Amino acid sequence: MSYQLWYWSDIPGRGEFVRLALEAGNIPYRDCAREPDIGSKGLIDDMLRPRQHPPFAPPYLVADGMTLGQTANILYFLGERHGLAPDDVAGRLWVNQLQLTIADIVAEAHDVHHPIATSLYYEDQQTEAKRRASYFRQERIPKYLAYFERVLQDGDGWLAGGARWSYADLSLYHLIFGLLYAFPHRMARIARDYPRVFAVHDRVANLPALQTYLTSPRRLAMGMDLFRHYAELDDGPSGDSLG
Amino acid sequence: MSYQLWYWSDIPGRGEFVRLALEAGNIPYRDCAREPDIGSKGLIDDMLRPRQHPPFAPPYLVADGMTLGQTANILYFLGERHGLAPDDVAGRLWVNQLQLTIADIVAEAHDVHHPIATSLYYEDQQTEAKRRASYFRQERIPKYLAYFERVLQDGDGWLAGGARWSYADLSLYHLIFGLLYAFPHRMARIARDYPRVFAVHDRVANLPALQTYLTSPRRLAMGMDLFRHYAELDDGPSGDSLG
């Protein structure tokens, strides 16, 4: 029986990190809430029904009788079970550590457009969002990307070293993809500082195992999601300064 | 050789989740940055020196030749190695999932007092903090605590079920401890809604294995930390409303 992925049907969101691992690993799965007779309403019903290990939020994966929530936890399971991470304990923990660091900047990228409350519209927290975005662009993006650049400097082009990608490389790809979508001016200005990070982005985008997925209708467009593009939250074409 | 924990010397912070696991598990460790000849400067030096798997930030644990960063990742290692989580795969992943959910609310609790930038003083983002705090108290705390209450409703008093605590129970204890410190009025008003969550807090506080630590000078006082108490970010004594 194939795995069941449960995530909102209309955004890439955190589900995309799981989808990329399933697709690149050639692992059969159902994307349940995207089936017409299920949808987002079916997702909510499924999430609320009694079960031994309820998830706090989507995404979650039903696999081997387990319900696994939390993106990094799902990926840890897939990595170990399907060889999407190194086999040894040290390698598996290292990839998990990298994934959790990616999760941290993803959460920060979300809070750029929702710095006050997820329950409010962006427009109702736009003033605070502009202020937070300035620091995110100028301090946080460089801090994280410099870290991943440092990690990559001793390897063979993949985060965990070795000749093959791990699920953390797929997630780094989607992080950069999302940052390029949300902050195109800023990212264009700093790309040259992180050549190894952008090389991972390009290598993942060209992985043979992902080509069918990346050009298929299964891949959802960016939009009202973790990564959002609002021109006022990016640099201007000629840059700006803190304030 | 005992493990080396590296974390800031003057705050409980995220290091406390690791300390509680080490102490409750009776696992020998050095709290390196608290040794007088090392200190926070020694921590910064150590973090910057070249190594195979550099941590992004403290806490990190040097164990068996590995450097393990990210709190939940350190705890996953300790849980598996020292029996601080169930033995089976499903149980280990479930405790990891719970830990990651605790990590999410901890990050949100931090951002209540730093909604714009970690590099700014609280006083320079106090207006935004007041607004975020209102939603955190009235929407986010109940959402998370209701979830943990639901998880606890079918077990024997511990998050992962069974007769013994796991590291997620220790972390839930510290989460509640931190929320009680930061939002005493709010927490007093809602405690009756989450009896099982508060029972975990009380059971962990009374664990025989933790008594020496909890009353020792090794345990740092709360302060300028993840959980901060500012009266203006809590309810008033008679409650308040969104806005």
Image (spheres, coloured by chain):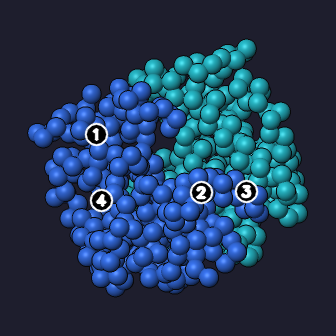
Chain colours: A cyan, B blue
Disc 1 to disc 2, C-alpha distance? 29 Å
What is the C-alpha distance between the residues marked 2 and 4?
26 Å
Q: Quadrant of residue B157?
A: bottom left
Instruction: Write down the chain letter for disc 2.
Output: B
Find the distance from the CA under tag 3 to the CA under tag 1.
37 Å
Sequence-wise first label, 1 or 2: 2
Is there one chain holding both mark 3 and mark 1? yes
Is residue B69 shown to the viewer in this render? yes
Mark 3 or 2, nearer chain start: 2
Q: Secondary structure at mark 1?
A: loop
Q: If you read the primary sequence from the N terminus, does the residue marked by circle 3 or circle 4 appear first?
A: 3
Please name the residue shown 25% across and 34% down the image: B232
- B221 to A148, vertically: above or below: below
The tag on residue B177 is: 4
- Subunit under mark 3: B
Tell me the chain of label 1: B
Give the labeled residue for mark 3: B49
Instruction: Check residue B43 in the rendering and tell me which mark sits there, or answer none.
Output: 2
Query: Is A177 placed above or below B98 here?
Result: above
Q: Secondary structure at mark 3?
A: loop
Residue marked by disc 1: B230
Give the distance between the C-alpha atoms of the residues marked 3 and 4, in whole angstroms. 35 Å
Kindly identify the amino acid type of the residue bearing the numbered disc 1. Answer: Tyr
